[in-house]
Structures are given as structure tokens and as C-alpha cells.
Image (cartoon, rainbow, N blue to C red):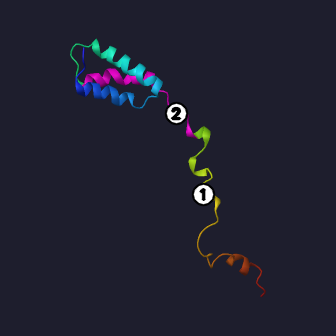
Amino acid sequence: MSLPAEIDELVLQLAASLTPSQYDAFVIAARTTLAGIPCIGPGSAYRVLAPLQRRFFDPPEERVAVGPRHHHQTKLTMLPPVGAEDPRTGGRDRTRLRMV
């Protein structure tokens, strides 16, 4: 049994976030599941496929374990700042030991 184009598109959209090894398994399982439903529309297909897609989805590793990306070294953070030095630099040091 062939699925309508909009339902086949829904299956492919849900499979797009899966890894390549899980992609084919999900598409086969989704088409098998949908073949058993006599009257199917996009809404009912989504309600059936959403829990199925969750079973095949492996979330990526957490960023917290790796650390935030903004702390990694880049060319911009490794080089000295560009531009003239601020005239206020060292102002506190110049006035700290003022003789009265």
C-alpha cells in the first residue's frame, strides 16, 4: 500500500533528525505502522508517528558535560586586542599613591 504524498513527507521529516543508521529503521517501522491504519490523515499519522520517532531518537550529548562553547580558544581570544589603548588605563594606579 502506498502512502499519500503528504504523509510520506511527514515520515521523511520526522526521520530527518535521526542518525543514518536509525533513519532507515524508522522509515520502515513508520510505513509498517501506517499500513495497518485503514483511514489515515496527516494529524492521525503524526499522533501515531511521534512516539515511534522518540524511540529511535538518541539525543546528542549534553553541552554541560563538554562545557560552554564561548570558553573555547579561538583566533580572536588568542590575539591581543586591536586598537589604541584606552586613556583611562592605569588611572587608578596613577592616583593611588598621590602625595598630599
- The structure residue drawn at horizontal position 34% and vertical position 31%, both measured from the top left corner, is 13
Query: Label 2 amino acid?
Result: Pro
Q: Give the image location of residue 32, x and y in percent.
A: 33, 14
Determine the main secondary structure of the stretch shown in magenta: helix
**Where the C terminus falls, by quadrant?**
bottom right
Q: Which residue is mark 1?
A: 75
From this viewpoint, which residue is outermost toward the bottom?
100
- Label 2, label 1: how many angstroms apart (C-alpha)? 27 Å
Say which quarter of the image contains residue 86.
bottom right
Q: Which amino acid does the dot numbered 1 rest on?
A: Lys
Task: From the image, tell me which residue sits under label 2.
Answer: 60
Q: Is residue 14 left or right of residue 22?
A: left
- For marks 2 and 1, the one nearer the N-term is 2
The segment highlighted magenta reads: 42-63
Task: Count neighbours of disc 1 (C-alpha within 10 A) and say few if under 14, some if 14 to 19, many if 20 or more.
Answer: few
Label 2 crowd (10 A; few <14 / some 14-19 / many >=20): few
Front in this rendered view, residue 96 or 42: 42
Residue 25 occupies quadrant: top left
Residue 49 inside the magenta-drawn segment: yes
